[in-house]
Image (cartoon, grey):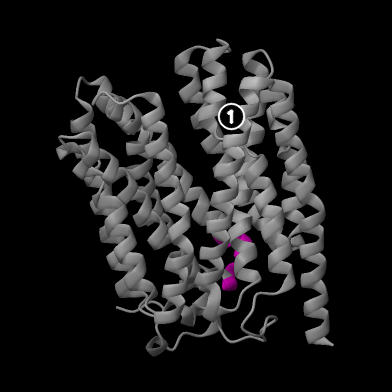
Amino acid sequence: MMFGSKKSGLQPAKVFDSAYLFIFLFGIVSLFSDMTHEGARSITGPYLSSFGLSAAAVGIIAGFGEFIGYGLRFVSGYLSDKTRRYWLVTGIGYAINLLSVPLLALAGRWEVVAFLMILERAGRAIRNPARDAMLSHATSEVGHGKGFGIHEALDQIGATTGPLIIFFVLLSGATMRHAFAWLLLPALVALSILLFTRIGYPNPQTLEVSKKENLKGAHFPRAYWFYLVAASLIATGFVDYPLLAFHFQKLDVMQGSLIAIYYAVAMGVDAIAALIFGSLYDKIGIRALIVATLVSFAFPLFAFADGSIFALVGVILWGIGMGAQESIMRAVIATLSIKEKRATAYGFFNMVYGIAWFIGSSIFGILYTISLPIAIGFSVLLQLLALPFFLLSGRSQDEKVADIQG
């Protein structure tokens, strides 16, 4: 059974249908994958605390896990392009990422818990560049923005469902160990669908039918670097939801139960925004990110204001920004890189983006303790500073295409 191999002899119209199926299947894999690891991440903090660790220790472990989770992506992407073994790298990454979660149920020491948490992030780092490179072949046929938007929407359904499953498992009287054990089920479903997809699409690069390449050469184009600067500024200026939740709880903006509901709202908005702005990207290009930034940059002005209504508006704007980033940013990388170096392009971009996010979150946290208005100003300013670099990236890309066509 081969849906997208060279031997299938698919005509262009059939390839188009097959590309949609490939995106959908990987979206379902991501749905159950996010259900697993996002469900676990909702209680790993309290789980570590149950071993007697301090808040500082929990923060260091989580922070180091995120650092590994982004730092390894460049290495993973480079090796994927070098070996051309995209499925192998993706499979290893998913196996590490998913199977480390239920093993938390067996951990008897905090060191083992910390190791498994970091291992889960490492698995995610290993899988993502190769997976996105394969997805980009399919999205080239349906539209990079639309394709990655569909994938992100399915991904966020899992990210929302996972923590809710954990909530109801714990509500039933089960322990956190039991909750981790339950997550073996979605992990196995994700791996099974991944295997099915691998059998059906042994050569996903054939989904990208031959067309005139707009990009040539061994190096990334100037548009890529302008875009990387813009995305890094957005990442530095954005705020992690845990800090928003901390603010809501600290100032008693809303009841504790509403904080979780607001997060679910944010994830729902994220999914819808991914579809809308992903499709918009296919029509107007990188200008879609400019529109998304202009819509969402003011989220801290509302989220950190007094009152639950303002907080809700802020959370909705935050979700719009996240959805646009997760869908359009991957679509842009697919547009700005050649097939042979696409995993490297994703890996390097994600490494820099993750480091910028980590630095920005740290700075915002420090500024928050000093002066909330300064912290808000920092967030808004960094996001607005990204706009001219988005424009430069789009202009450079247009000039490159014009030169080739001329």
Image location (x, y in percent) of residue 221: 70, 74
Query: What residue is shown with label 1?
Result: 365
Residue 84 part of the magenta-drawn span: no
Residue 116 lies in what quarter of the image? top left
Which residue is at 36% across, 54% downward? 122
Secondary element at tag 1? helix
- Circle 1: is it few (<14), some (14-19), or many (20+) Cα within 10 Å? some
Residue 302 lies in what quarter of the image? top right
Residue interval drawn in magenta: 140-147
Q: Is residue 196 visible in this depiction of the protein?
A: yes
Image location (x, y in percent) of residue 327: 59, 54
Q: Nearer the viewer, residue 10 or 141?
A: 141
Q: Is residue 130 visible in this depiction of the protein?
A: no
Q: Is residue 82 above or below residue 346?
A: below
**What predominant SS class does the magenta segment belong to?**
helix
Q: Is residue 219 above or below residue 185?
A: below
Q: Is residue 23 left or right of residue 164?
A: right
